[in-house]
């Protein structure tokens, strides 16, 4: 099935919001999914899908037939450079005109965070490919607070190794809004946008907001980096990811995640969503 836009990662945190926005706008797009099982919920909403896998060049080639613009987002992991590299090469063969790639805050070749280095490798490959592109560098998602739902419910507590540092957490819905604009208009080629919330807040601020909205005590309890890492491994998290998140927590705890960008408003014309609004919109999850 041909379409002008191909969305990868369309069932994830950001991609699912992007799919919904494009569908509401009746955009000519399709979503790349890995299986019929993943495709079914999208198809039930009337979203066109195509089955493919980043490890299968032939399936990517087929998915890109007739496509002019792509939203590139794949599962994080040690194989993502290879997988996204396959995708970029297929885009070149298919004469795709434009790539919107989601990377991460701090993406750089010399980052202590492996994921940021991997994103930097793919960005460099895209630059050398001759394809038009825009890179998105989102901060940590507000949606990450969903991981604290159980301890908020059972203990009235949030545990994190962030000390009292502030960070400019961003709503994934805003990232999707930015991507929607990029895929529907010209003028963003060659640019990199840093996507943050409208303010830098601390974990204590987050706990205080939830406490006020829930009408129950919610405390932020700082933990050590090592204890947080052990907890992540205990939940079955891959060691590389636990190590990366530990490095990222150290960076944020040192105060290096507090920069606030206006890029969301620049692209969409709307201010980024504050955490309080995000919490109000999702408060039933925390009850």
Image (spheres, grey):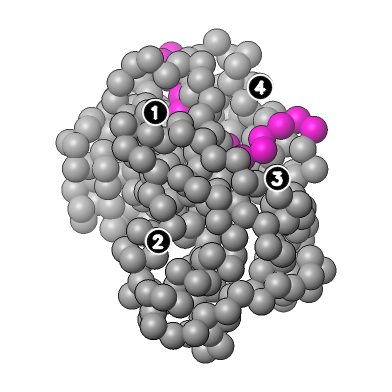
**Region of the chain picked out in magenta, as a range:** 93-110
Please say if the residues under marks 1 and 3 sit with CB atoms less than 8 Å apart: no
Q: Is residue 111 left or right of residue 236?
A: right
Which one is nearer the viewer's eye here, 116 or 208? Answer: 208
Q: In 3D space, how far apart are the residues under numbered discs 3 and 2 (Cα atoms)?
A: 22 Å
- Residue assigned mark 2: 276
Question: Is residue 204 on the magenta stretch?
Answer: no
Please say if the residues under marks 2 and 1 sit with CB atoms less than 8 Å apart: no
**Comparing labels 2 and 4, the label whose residue is closer to the camera:** 2
Secondary structure at badge 4 equals helix
Give the number of callouts. 4
Label 2: few (<14), some (14–19) or many (≥20) C-alpha neighbours in 10 Å = some
**Residue 58 seen from this side:** no
Q: In 3D space, how far apart are the residues under numbered discs 4 and 3 (Cα atoms)?
A: 24 Å
Q: In 3D space, how far apart are the residues under numbered discs 2 and 1 (Cα atoms)?
A: 22 Å
Quarter assignment of residue 188 = top left
Q: In 3D space, how far apart are the residues under numbered discs 1 and 4 (Cα atoms)?
A: 25 Å
Secondary structure at badge 1 equals helix
Question: Is residue 101 on the magenta stretch?
Answer: yes
Please say if the residues under marks 3 and 2 sit with CB atoms less than 8 Å apart: no
**Comparing labels 1 and 4, the label whose residue is closer to the camera:** 1
- Residue assigned mark 1: 266
Q: Residue furthest bottom?
A: 154
- Residue assigned mark 4: 124
Which one is nearer the viewer's eye here, 240 or 261? Answer: 261
> What residue is shown at x 29% (from left), y 56% (from top)?
40
- Percent across and percent down for residue 86 are 58, 30
In the picture, the disc for residue 256 is 3
């Amino acid at each position: 099935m041909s379409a002008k836009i191909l969305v990868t990662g369309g069932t994830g945190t950001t991609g699912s919001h992007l799919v919904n926005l494009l569908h509401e706008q009746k955009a000519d797009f399709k979503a790349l999914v890995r299986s019929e099982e993943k495709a079914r919920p999208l198809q039930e909403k009337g979203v066109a899908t195509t089955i493919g896998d980043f490890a299968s060049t032939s399936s990517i080639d087929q998915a890109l037939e007739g496509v002019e613009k792509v939203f590139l987002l794949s599962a994080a992991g040690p194989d993502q450079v290879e997988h996204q590299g396959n995708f970029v090469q297929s885009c070149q063969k298919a004469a795709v005109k434009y790539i919107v790639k989601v990377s991460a805050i701090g993406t750089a070749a010399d980052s202590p965070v492996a994921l940021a280095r991997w994103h930097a490798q793919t960005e460099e490959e895209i630059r050398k490919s001759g394809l038009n592109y825009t890179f998105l560098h989102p901060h940590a998602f507000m949606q990450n607070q969903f991981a604290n739902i159980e301890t908020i419910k059972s203990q009235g507590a949030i545990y994190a190794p962030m000390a009292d540092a502030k960070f400019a957490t961003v709503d994934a819905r805003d990232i999707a809004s930015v991507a929607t604009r990029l895929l529907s208009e010209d003028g963003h080629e060659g640019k990199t946008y840093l996507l943050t919330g409208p303010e830098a807040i601390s974990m204590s601020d987050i706990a205080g907001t939830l406490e006020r909205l829930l009408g129950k005590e919610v405390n932020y309890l700082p933990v050590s980096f090592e204890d947080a890492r052990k907890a992540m491994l205990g939940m079955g998290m891959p060691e590389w990811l636990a190590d990366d998140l530990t490095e990222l927590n150290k960076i944020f705890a040192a105060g290096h995640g507090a920069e606030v960008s206006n890029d969301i408003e620049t692209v969409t014309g709307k201010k980024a969503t504050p955490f309080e609004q995000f919490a109000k919109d999702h408060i039933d999850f925390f009850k």
